[in-house]
Amino acid sequence: MEQKQCFVAVDFEDDDNVKGYLYWYLCRFANVEEGDKVVAPLGRHNNLQQGVVRQVLFAYEDDAPFPVHYIKNIRNLVKADSDSLYKIVKKRELNSTVTMMEVLAPLVAKKAEAGQFIILRVDDDGERIPLTVAGYDRKAGTVKIIFQVVGGTTMRLNAKREGEYIADFVGPLGCATKTDGLKKVCVVGGGVGCAIALPVAQKLHEQGCEVHTIIGFRSKDLLILEDEFKACSDKLTVVTDDGSYGRKGVVTIPLKESIESGEKYDEVIAIGPLIMMKFVVATTKPFGIPTTVSMNPIMIDGTGMCGGCRLTVGGKTKFACVDGPDFDGFEVDFDEAMARSNMYAEFEQRERERCNLFKKEVE
Ligand code: FAD
Ligand code: FES
Ligand code: MG
């Protein structure tokens, strides 16, 4: 038998162009009430906006306020007495391809630790992508993400403006980086991997550990977070491939020099491109310095069920999302991980082209 459906009339009261008008939506949240806030797509480009529910109607399809197939869906509901929307409260470009966002997500902010990640969907019809928790403010209920624009989804995310919303933001996922008992650590970050390395360096610094940091970028214009690293490092070395800033060369050169000069590290923590982590491990292994790497293979559900993120570590299959993302670098099969990370290259290229077309249309 046909069931009644839930329809809500929404007033986008913060938008001067439309406030006071009521827009009808289908609502999958049966507990919705007048006064609740919702996020819903508005206008030709379906930009997600926040509005207030002014009317709730449970009706059969024939009694719907509009033909049901014309009605869009509510994306997110926040009860009048809570505040957990995924609003982008701050957005800043760190360089031409890397962006920082602070997102209102109090439940994630409450529990997140360095080394953990979230999975987000930019829009309802979007794919799920993992991004590391680059920081959090438990009081303000915000989580910081720093991402590099590399393909379709990160392009869509970067197109969002401060004050707009993200459809889903799930986490914290994965295991926190283990820092207990560490007294002297060298943190090595490469490119956007520095965004993931920063909260780890900060946590080590806060617990009184001596932190030496080496960060590497292709060139000066890609440099990020230098001041933030300075603040939490006892020694900071910046390298660029082309020598346009800091020392010329790759991160393993100063790392090897430090070790050979007698620095005794309890551990080296390396976070960056797979190839960088592979060579960091090749540098530390002959000295027997325990080395942790942060693996970021393709992830889909982030809960250990899909198997998308599997890696071989110590000859055994591990799932980066639940067993990691941190692993013993000496045990990781980097060559296999690198081959698997290119698996969807063709699909990704197509999506990038689609997004570029979309961007041009909007401009
Ligand atoms: P696409 O064109 O689809 O892909 C570009 C490349 O991104 C691919 O070659 C692939 O290596 C990677 N990628 C694509 N989809 C996924 C996926 N579902 N899971 C993992 N990798 C994918 N990037 C950041 O910039 N900042 C971070 O803090 C960060 N943290 C991460 C933490 C984890 C645990 C993992 C697994 C990945 C993290 N990444 C991070 C990588 C980020 O998820 C990808 O750059 C993003 O998914 C790219 O999506 P796209 O559609 O824009 O690009
Ligand atoms: Fe699905 Fe890890 S992402 S099992
Ligand atoms: Mg993609």
Image (cartoon, rainbow, N blue to C red):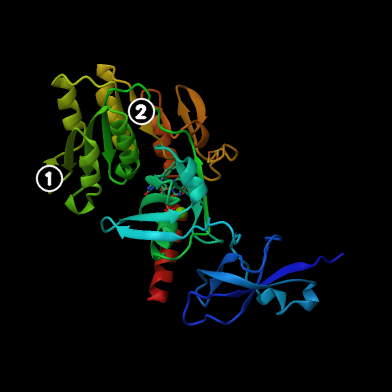
> Within 10 angstroms of label 1, few (less than 14), some, or many (20 or more) residues?
some
Disc 2 marks which amino acid?
Answer: Thr
Q: Are marks 2 and 1 in contact (CB under 8 Å)?
A: no
Residue at the spot of label 2: 292
* Dot 1 amino acid type: Gly
Task: Pick the quarter of the image with the C terminus.
Answer: bottom left
Mark 2 secondary-structure assignment: strand
Q: CA gap, disc 2 to disc 1?
A: 27 Å
Indicate if the residue with disc 2 has its beta carbon within 8 Å of ligand 1.
no
Give the residue at mark 1: 243
Residue 112 located left or right of residue 69: left
Left or right: 327 as drawn, with respect to 121: left
Quarter in which the N terminus is drawn: bottom right
Work out whether residue 298 can be spotted: no
Ligand 2, what quadrant? top right
Residue sitting at x 13%, y 21%: 261
Indicate whether 182 appears above or below 357: above
Q: Where is residue 222 drawn, in percent x and y?
A: 23, 52
Question: Cβ of disc 1 within 8 Å of ligand 1?
Answer: no
Q: Position of residue 25 (x, y in %)?
A: 65, 72
Task: Say whether residue 265 is visible.
Answer: yes
Q: Residue furthest right?
A: 1
Q: Secondary structure at mark 1?
A: loop
User: Above or below — where is 14 with respect to 256?
Assistant: below
Sequence-first tag of 2 and 1: 1
> In x, y percent, where is residue 274?
34, 37
Q: Which-is-in-front pick, marks 2 and 1? A: 2
